[in-house]
Image (cartoon, grey):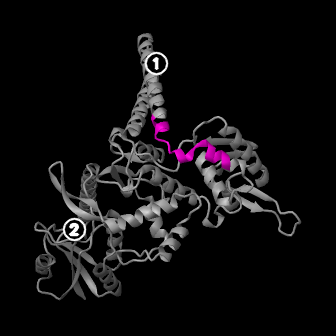
Amino acid sequence: MYDAIYARQSIEKIDSISVESQIDFCCYETRGGEYRKYVDKGYSGKNTNRPAFEKMLSDIEKGIIKRVIVYKLDRISRSILDFSNMMEVFQKHNVEFVSSTEKFDTSTPIGRAMLNICIVFAQLERETIQKRVADAYYSRSKKGFYMGGRVPYGFALENTTIDGIKTSKYVPIKEEVEQIKLMYSIYSQPTKTLGDILRYFNKHGLKHLRGKSWNTSRISELLRSPIYVKADSEIYKFYKSQGSNIVNDISDFIGENACYLYKGETNNRKQYSLENKHLVLAPHTGIVSSAEWLKCRIKCINNRQVTTTNRAKNSWLVGKVKCGNCGYALVVRKSDRRRKNVVRYFVCSNKTATGRCKGCGTVRADNLESFMFETIKNKLTEFNVLTNTSKHVSDPKINEYKIKISQIDKEIDDLLKKVLTANDTLMKYINEHIEKLDEERNQISKKLMSLSSEKTNDNNSIDKITDYISHWTETCFEDKILVVDALIKVIHIADGKIDITWKI
């Protein structure tokens, strides 16, 4: 039987002891006897997934090892559970354990107790180091420092300095940026899919400029990334609504810088969930307008609720109609095709897929389309000009007004939270201050509406949309979808009730 000398080193550092030095120390314990070396270089002690360690355990079970010698306890394990399991194996095969620098005697109760105490502190040290690394990472990421990783498509790295500290930032690569802008332009159209982008790129020979091949998963990843957006107040509100932690104040979202998105501490296992993730303004300038980016991002969210096989082909309302009970998309199903007259129905995709929703009731597609057509006609009579919803107006003043309104809303909410504990004097102050804030908000809202109206594209006049409505039966399917997308944000249906959220 042999002695086993086990040595481990995760990374080579000036202040760490090499595996060769560890073995030299351990050789003294063998007193010139025979031994075998088991060395794991480049492996952490947080678990036992190490080839040499597993080989040593295998030799122990074969009965050819009588004693295991290590330089120090944390060289073999930094986990209480792993160490406990390891000692059970040692005791089962009558294997003695020796730490050459700590002099443990595992043959006595006191020695075993001291051994367990030391492993507790070894695990504590490892977890403390992990915490320090995580804190340093989060602290640097909050300042917009480049944190390593793959450089995203469309950018290259350039050295820069932030707060006196050298780091890197992204700079655009013209040819790649043009491809990304084209992707967003195509996908922002209501009827276009990821497959349409892929077919367009293949048809026109637009190859991946980094030697890879395009596929829908890769394109979807680019369309979801905030690394490309010119982040303004609407981007702030979107991520806030998704439960993300936003480092910067809304006043910093001026429609210029893009964003970094970091994984936060969350138990949410959904791959695309933004909950508890950290959003930080990046030092580089975005390349896609917030309006176009949001169209694509929200479309990606909706696509997770309804499969691509249900793209808008059975009704010009598909994609806009949601279940009022669960929020999932309504899709069109047809009655038995053997019947003389095939009837189309809107059904809840969540109910049909999982059965977790009671559904929205019986909704015939023909009836809903007729109702929505009349509703749209009536709605259009209320407006002289249709707000441009397909072309984003880049005006810093508009974003400034939106930011100010959000700040006023937050200030009002903070005041309302104090109402329950307020005395008469404080209540008087709260009421007066809220009135002033509300008046200020109304004035800013009027300025915002006026400015937005001035920036409206004349091509989207009410006359043009009304012309489509006047010739609805002759209007092609794709144009009907464009009209609905220009006018309506979402339609919720449940238990015979229809709730329409308009864009105008």
Residue 335 horizontal side relative to residue 95, left or right? right
Residue at the spot x=35%, y=43% of the render?
254
Q: Position of residue 489 (x, y in %)?
A: 59, 46
Q: Looking at the image, can residue 153 be seen?
A: no
The mark nearer the N terminus, 2 or 1, is 2
Q: Secondary structure at mark 2?
A: helix
Residue 320 horizontal side relative to residue 337, left or right? left
Residue lying farthest to the top in this orientation: 425
Up the image or down, 449 lies above or below 310; here it is above
Return the residue at label 2: 73
Near mark 1 (Cα within 10 A), the count class, few <14, some 14-19 or many ≥20, is few
Whether pointer 2 and pointer 1 mark residues with C-beta atoms closer than 8 Å, the reply is: no
Q: Position of residue 288 (x, y in %)?
A: 40, 55
Return the residue at label 1: 435
Residue at the spot x=43%, y=53% of the render?
266
The numbered disc on residue 141 is none
Residue at the spot x=50%, y=45% of the render?
457
Where does the magenta region start and end?
451-467
Up the image or down, 224 lies above or below 8; here it is above
Q: Determine which quarter of the picture holds residue 182.
A: bottom left
Q: Looking at the image, can residue 131 be seen?
A: yes
- Amino acid type at mark 2: Leu
Q: Determine which quarter of the picture holds residue 20.
A: bottom left
Q: Secondary structure at mark 1?
A: helix
Q: Position of residue 229 (x, y in %)?
A: 39, 54
Residue lying farthest to the right in this orientation: 340
